[in-house]
Image (tube, rainbow, N blue to C red):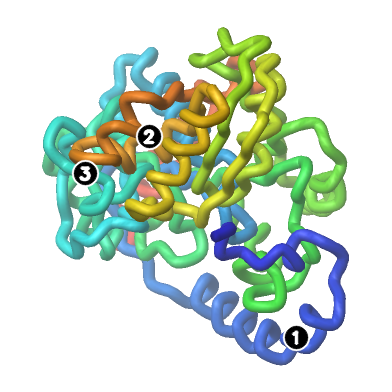
């Protein structure tokens, strides 16, 4: 099973994209209207939102982790707010990585909770209020730019330099979540990840709209000692090919690669296939940190697979190492200005 994002989303627009254009147009009108007219509640602390123009990952989670570390270096207590996509809990919850499993809270929140206090909530304003109650002085939202009902002080949109906006069409004809110019109107800045040219057009559009942009790259922070190893690589993320390129970048040889759907929990048969193939062919099993946490806390075959996995972890390295700190400072300033406006209205 591959990612739920259809492959044609990431190639030049073809008959499928154009056939779906009327639906995409309607979806875009609705999503754009909601962005422009949705009422956003406020909280008394700065809110940074890290989002995407498109469906699927472009590096949001490593980005929010980097920003949180910059905030902690300033003596702040950041907290993460996530919808908990892929988890079953539908109540506002403080994530405990020692007790919760990905099937309940989602895989990304488990990764975030290792770094700072993390709350999942289907209603983001309730999650934000819970974080404030828990004593955080900076909220970092992982996604939610287009749909959140929380006032955002700094919106950073991450775009992959290899994939860009795909075919440029709005869901369901393409991966774009809402009209690009509408999204840019509410964005504070862009973050271009990688060295490709697919994001250059949107960067130029953003520049004409006076939106600043940063550049960054994903760098391996753990699991780099696999040079010369023959491996079985599996990944259930939005863009598995990105992980496979990372595996090759550390010098490993991928003998077998298996791609699963984003956030997908592996079945017993799928786990058996991975373990059996690796055993027969003498391969080291490697995967992503997100896939690994989905195995954590389980028993049986899942526990066996987790024990045999080598995890290749990545972090977001900004070209300007001061950029994450600057983002935090700008969010604090914007929050201060927002609160002054709120007081004047009273």
Whole-percent x, y for residue 167 in the image: 80, 65
Quickly name the residue at label 1. Answer: 21
Which residue is situated farthest in the bottom direction here? 22
Q: Earlier in the sequence, mark 2 or mark 1?
A: 1
Q: Residue at x 30, y 59 (%)?
A: 124
Quickly name the residue at label 2. Answer: 292
Q: Nearer the viewer, residue 313 or 283?
A: 283
Q: Quadrant of the C terminus?
A: bottom left
Whole-percent x, y for residue 188 in the image: 60, 46
Quickly name the residue at label 3. Answer: 101
- For the residues labelled 2 and 3, the Cα–Cα distance comes to 11 Å
Whether residue 152 appears in this view of the structure is: no
Whether residue 167 appears in this view of the structure is: yes
| Label 2 element class | helix
Q: Nearer the viewer, residue 4 or 323?
A: 4
Q: Residue at x 19, y 37 (%)?
A: 297
Number of numbered callouts drawn: 3
Image height of 145 relative to 176, above or below = above
| Label 3 element class | loop
| Label 1 element class | helix
Q: Earlier in the sequence, mark 1 or mark 3?
A: 1
Q: Earlier in the sequence, mark 2 or mark 3?
A: 3
Image height of 58 relative to 330, above or below = below
């Amino acid at each position: 099973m591959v990612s739920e994002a259809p492959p044609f989303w990431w190639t030049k627009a073809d008959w499928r994209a154009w056939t779906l254009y009327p639906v995409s147009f309607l979806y875009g009108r609705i999503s754009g209207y909601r962005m422009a007219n949705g009422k956003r509640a406020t909280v008394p602390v700065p809110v940074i939102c890290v989002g995407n123009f498109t469906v699927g990952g472009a590096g949001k989670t490593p980005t929010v982790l980097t920003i949180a570390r910059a905030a902690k270096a300033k003596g702040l207590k950041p907290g993460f707010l996530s919808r908990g996509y892929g988890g079953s809990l539908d109540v506002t919850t403080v994530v405990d990585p020692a007790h919760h499993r990905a099937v309940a809270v989602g895989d990304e929140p488990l990764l975030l909770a290792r770094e700072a206090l993390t709350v999942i909530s289907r209603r983001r304003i309730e999650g934000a209020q819970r974080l404030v109650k828990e004593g955080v002085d900076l909220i970092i939202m992982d996604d939610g730019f287009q749909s959140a009902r929380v006032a955002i002080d700094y919106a950073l949109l991450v775009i992959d330099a290899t994939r860009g906006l795909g075919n440029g069409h709005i869901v369901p004809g393409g991966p774009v979540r809402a009209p690009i110019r509408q999204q840019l109107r509410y964005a504070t800045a862009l973050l271009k990840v990688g060295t490709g040219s697919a994001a250059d057009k949107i960067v130029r559009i953003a520049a004409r709209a006076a939106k600043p942009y940063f550049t960054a790259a994903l760098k391996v922070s753990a699991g780099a000692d696999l040079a010369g190893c023959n491996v079985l690589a599996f990944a259930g993320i939005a863009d598995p090919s990105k992980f496979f390129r990372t595996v090759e970048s550390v010098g490993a040889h991928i003998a077998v690669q298996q791609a699963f759907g984003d956030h997908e929990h592996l079945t017993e048969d799928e786990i058996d296939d991975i373990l059996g193939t690796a055993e027969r062919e003498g391969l080291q099993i490697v995967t992503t940190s997100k896939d690994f946490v989905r195995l954590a806390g389980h028993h049986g075959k899942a526990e066996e697979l987790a024990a045999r996995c080598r995890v290749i972890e990545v972090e977001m390295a900004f070209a300007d190492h001061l950029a994450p700190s600057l983002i935090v400072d700008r969010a604090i300033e914007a929050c201060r200005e927002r609160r002054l406006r709120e007081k004047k209205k009273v």
